[in-house]
Amino acid sequence: MTDTTAPSLASLAVPECHIRETGLLPEHVTAFRRQGVLAVRGLLSPAELESVQEAAAGLIDDAWRTRSMHDTIWTLEPHEPDAAPVRIEYVMDKSPVMARLAGHPLLLRAMETLVGPNFIPTWDSMVFKTTAGAPRLAWHRDGQMYSDAVAVTGGGRVIDVGIYLDHAPEDNCVWAIPQSNYWEDEQVTETADRLNATEWDATGAVPAVMRPGDALLHNILTLHGAPAVVGKQRRVVYYEYRPGEVERQLGPHVPEYVGLKQQVLRACLEQRAASGEHRDEEPFEYRPVEQYRLWDESPAISGLRFPHEEYWRW
Amino acid sequence: MTDTTAPSLASLAVPECHIRETGLLPEHVTAFRRQGVLAVRGLLSPAELESVQEAAAGLIDDAWRTRSMHDTIWTLEPHEPDAAPVRIEYVMDKSPVMARLAGHPLLLRAMETLVGPNFIPTWDSMVFKTTAGAPRLAWHRDGQMYSDAVAVTGGGRVIDVGIYLDHAPEDNCVWAIPQSNYWEDEQVTETADRLNATEWDATGAVPAVMRPGDALLHNILTLHGAPAVVGKQRRVVYYEYRPGEVERQLGPHVPEYVGLKQQVLRACLEQRAASGEHRDEEPFEYRPVEQYRLWDESPAISGLRFPHEEYWRW
Ligand code: NI
Ligand code: NI
């Protein structure tokens, strides 16, 4: 047997796909599955980026103005003087621009290739750091909800897509540990505990430096974290996708959730197609298999907000 | 909501990839995941086809000559006058040509893209119909070994590759039911029972017409069968692939099997590289993630034959 040298540090950097130049190629698919992260450069056109930035600013302004806790997470109780909003849930329902963004053809084609033809949208939110600053994001995996999680989704079929509206330079970006999507639970726990024991330790991790309009894909099993930051704005829209067949057999939501969220996806596609702004693009065509064309079997929807806690299986 | 019409029959034909012209594209990945089958046209060069045909003929001649049951399945007890051999196991170990075939770069690149970077070879065999004829192959799924099988591999991460050495025309080919890889157990059982109740019923199925040198990929969950045939020779080399992380967490073999079969794969790659016949091709580079580079952790191998029954987990 020839000796095979260990991968160099360089090979562990976040792999990149310049999606408007090449599309998502087989080598991007494998790089994402291998490393657990993929930077999709230039996903949004300048015009769409501007429109999403404006919508995001509107949602954040609403939070400050209303000081509501409805679908909004604050650093402290909203009435406290230093409180700041940091996360807003169900953004597709709150902003037609966010709904149209969820119909983005390049994004959805990438999800079809990576997640499979029956993919459905699950979580949608916006996470932001205001100039008030933000504490570190401790090292974590996003979801550990399946037993034998590495077998089910180590290869990257449950994907969190972060669409960046602002620069995320090295001192204000997410860091990820490549290939940790394949780690067993004990290694994840041991590593997270060790790294989280000091204020910021990124041993073994690589920075996901992002520009406005880029998207960072991460496998929900990839260990990631972010350093504390002061005085910088950074807004990220997060859309998560899962295979319909995994959701239906294993959850975490009830089986009916699949047909409901397929209706959400189809509504987003319709709203995008109906808007004059995206006239020149080839729309994404959603084509799950017969068995998973469930939108007509579930009650018609009247909005795009499906609170997770109303649909948990357990 | 706009109405979406049901897929036409045409859209349910076996999708095709002319691999030497286009490589395996994202649309082939999605077509395979959706339909559960994919015809890879012209995988073997004429020279390699000829060499594999010769090796296959040699293995079949050996079976007839020795009338041995070692790794060989016969239609009747081998000493009976009408007995014919129909299947030989562990062909990589029995023929250097079959071992080199298992190192085929286009095949392995396709497996890396479809199964993931940690793919391992599992089963290897040759199935053949001699001019003595063959009974029908009843409708079946190849493997039902995982609970929640559709969630684990409905999308096609466990793949059976049939490399055709002879023509398989419509009256002597495998038929498959597209998208049955996503069916629940009850629908599979009900359909197989119904179709198997008469001698040959292919309702809902499509023929996988193959030419020598083509490969048929099928998801192990896809329902398939074949009509009885008389007087035609048809030889198919079957190589199966699984994700290392699925094998290691869920079986069916013991965890140590992963490192052993990775050694088999690496040996096949070395043998192919060492042979003068494939001098002009770019070899496949096997690059699983750190966690799944297990070849050095398992005992060195002295052959390519790892009998399944010695490695079952249960
Ligand atoms: Ni996270
Ligand atoms: Ni079979």
Image (cartoon, coloured by chain):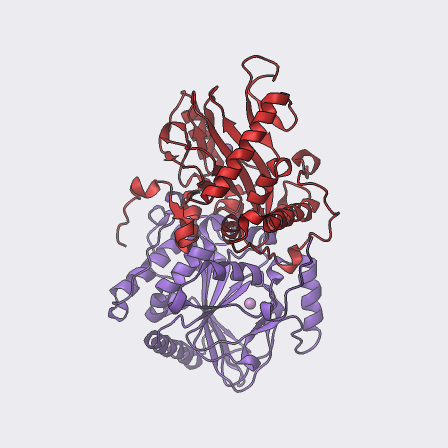
Chain colours: A purple, B red
Residue B108: % across, % down: 53, 50
State whether residue B219 appears in this view: no
Left or right of B204? Residue A160 is right
Residue A255's place in the image compared with A186, above or below, is above
Q: Is residue B186 left or right of residue B11?
A: right
> Residue extending furthest right?
B299
- Residue B106 versus residue A27 in the image, above or below: above
In this picture, is A196 found above or below B280? Answer: below
Q: Residue at x 63, y 40 (%)?
A: B252
Q: For the view shown, which residue lies furthest in the top direction? A: B81
Residue A86 or residue B186, whichever sits in front: B186
The one of B311 and B185 positioned closer to us in this rendering = B311
Exactly how many numbered labels are in the figure? 0
Q: Depth check: give the residue in front, A116 or A165.
A: A116
Q: Position of residue A61 (x, y in %)?
A: 40, 81
| B129 relative to A179, above or below | above
Residue B106, position in %: x, y?
49, 50
- At a point 53% along the width and 53% down the height, the residue shown is B112
Left or right, A234 with respect to B103, comes to left
The image quadrant of residue A205 is: bottom right
Which one is nearer the viewer's eye here, B217 or A126?
B217
Instruction: Tell me the quarter of the picture where residue A126 sits.
Output: bottom left
Percent position of residue B289, x then y: 62, 59
- Residue A244 seen in the figure: yes
